[in-house]
Image (tube, grey):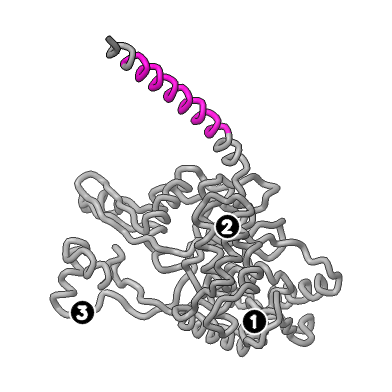
């Protein structure tokens, strides 16, 4: 990562260690949930942390896939984003109705209860922080896309649709841990919803359309299986999470983990100030992003790299240039330069080469040339025959 005067990037590179972490007071309140592990307490792993922060700054990147072995803090890093995510408007309705949806499709696009709220001049949404919606591996298809409320159907013999995880993920971060182990049917549903930005649930006479514009974040261990190309292509940045090579850094990571187990609140308090600063810096970068432009030099550098790699998917340009814009915004600049392209290129273009597609296109071109030759020969023979028939 190149040097910078940006406070956000200095926080990312810096390693702030709480003093005497092994001496942290041990507290057990019997609670199932506590403070998340502080993002800034994660030791090393700059590529992973940078990829996640760029996705927070610019959702247009297309999400992040973290690829690495077990125990390298992939899941911890994603869950630790909770204190850094920006604010948004959240629907008050179980069906996800919003003022934006009302403006797009009218009263037919919202439920009866929300139509009544509009009549009483009541809001459909409130200001809330972006959330991390986690998709469990044992989720059923109805859990993901939504379905009929079984309790109402049995007790009151009334059909009512309830939104699923994808609808709750709208405007939020959809986190899939061990995404390569996900059921194919659920994977297909996520692909369709991510591609269109909405999906429709139909159950008998009932049907509702839900928005599903989310930032997709996943983790996978390649030792446990590969990921289907269709869903791999949906992830913008691909960060490889390697084990820490420096023994001293590994010991510091051990200290942080033990301190968190003993007293999560204590460790979080040690990083609270820097976490608030980082959250503010991310919000400022998101605001600055709209003004960031790409210089001609950066444009040509990015296009040259993609052309050299023989990448066919147009998502390569989207991820590369949007990541570079996010990095420039994080560095408090309004122009993307060549160095920004070089900084994010590996994460944005990793594993995007289509070697099998290149061979297919080469074989297809040979077949097409043969077909054109045959067609031309047949046309020439037919033309020659017609000319001969017209001769006296």
> Does 274 sit above or below residue 173?
below
Q: Which residue is mark 2?
A: 177
Q: Which residue is mark 3?
A: 122
Mark earlier in primary sequence (2, 3): 3
List the single residue furthest toward the left. Answer: 119
Please name whichever residue, 323 or 35, is drawn nearer the observer in this view of the structure: 323
Classify mark 2: helix, strand or loop: loop
Check if mark 2's residue and mark 1's residue have beta carbons within 8 Å. no
118 left or right of 153 in image: left
Task: Give the spatial CA distance, label 3 vs label 1.
Answer: 42 Å
> Does 158 sit above or below residue 357?
below
Mark earlier in primary sequence (3, 1): 1
Classify mark 1: helix, strand or loop: helix
Please state which of the two labelled residues, at mark 3 or mark 1, is closer to the viewer.
Answer: 1
How many neighbours does mark 3 have within 10 angstroms: few (below 14), some (14-19), or many (20 or more)?
Answer: few
* Magenta highlight range: 363-386
Q: Which mark is residue 9?
A: 1
Picture quadrant of residue 326? bottom right
């Amino acid at each position: 990562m190149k040097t910078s005067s940006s406070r956000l990037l200095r926080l990312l590179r810096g390693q702030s260690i709480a003093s005497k972490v092994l001496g942290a007071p041990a507290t057990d309140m019997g609670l199932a949930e506590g403070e998340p592990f502080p993002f800034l307490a994660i030791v090393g792993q700059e590529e992973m942390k940078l990829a996640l922060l760029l996705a927070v700054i610019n959702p247009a990147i297309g999400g992040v896939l973290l690829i690495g072995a077990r125990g390298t803090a992939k899941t911890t890093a994603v869950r630790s984003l909770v204190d850094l995510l920006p604010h948004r408007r959240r629907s008050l309705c179980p069906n996800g109705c919003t003022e934006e949806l009302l403006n797009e499709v009218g009263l037919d696009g919202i439920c009866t209860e929300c139509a009544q709220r509009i009549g009483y001049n009541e809001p459909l949404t409130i200001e809330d922080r972006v959330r991390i919606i986690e998709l469990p591996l044992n989720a059923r298809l109805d859990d993901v896309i939504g379905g009929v409320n079984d309790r109402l159907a049995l007790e009151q013999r009334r059909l009512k649709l309830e939104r699923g995880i994808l609808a709750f993920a709208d405007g939020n971060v959809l986190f899939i841990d061990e995404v390569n182990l996900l059921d194919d049917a659920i994977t297909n549903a996520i692909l369709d919803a991510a591609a269109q930005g909405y999906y429709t649930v139909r159950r008998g006479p009932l049907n509702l359309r839900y928005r599903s514009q989310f930032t997709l974040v996943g983790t996978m261990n390649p030792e446990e299986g590969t990921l289907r190309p269709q869903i791999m292509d949906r992830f913008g940045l691909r960060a490889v999470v390697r084990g820490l090579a420096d023994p001293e850094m590994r010991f510091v990571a051990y200290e942080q983990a033990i301190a968190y187990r003993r007293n999560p609140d204590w460790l979080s308090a040690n990083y609270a100030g820097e976490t608030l600063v980082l959250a503010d810096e991310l919000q400022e970068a998101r605001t600055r992003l709209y003004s960031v432009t790409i210089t001609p030099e950066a444009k040509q550098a990015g296009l040259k790299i993609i052309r050299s790699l023989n990448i066919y998917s147009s998502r390569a340009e989207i991820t590369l240039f949007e990541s570079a814009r996010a990095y420039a915004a994080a560095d408090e600049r309004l122009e993307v330069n060549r160095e920004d392209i070089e900084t994010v290129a590996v994460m944005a273009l990793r594993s995007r080469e289509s070697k099998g597609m290149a061979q297919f296109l080469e074989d297809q071109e040979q077949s097409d040339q043969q077909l054109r030759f045959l067609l031309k020969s047949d046309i020439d023979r037919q033309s020659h025959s017609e000319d001969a028939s017209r001769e006296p």
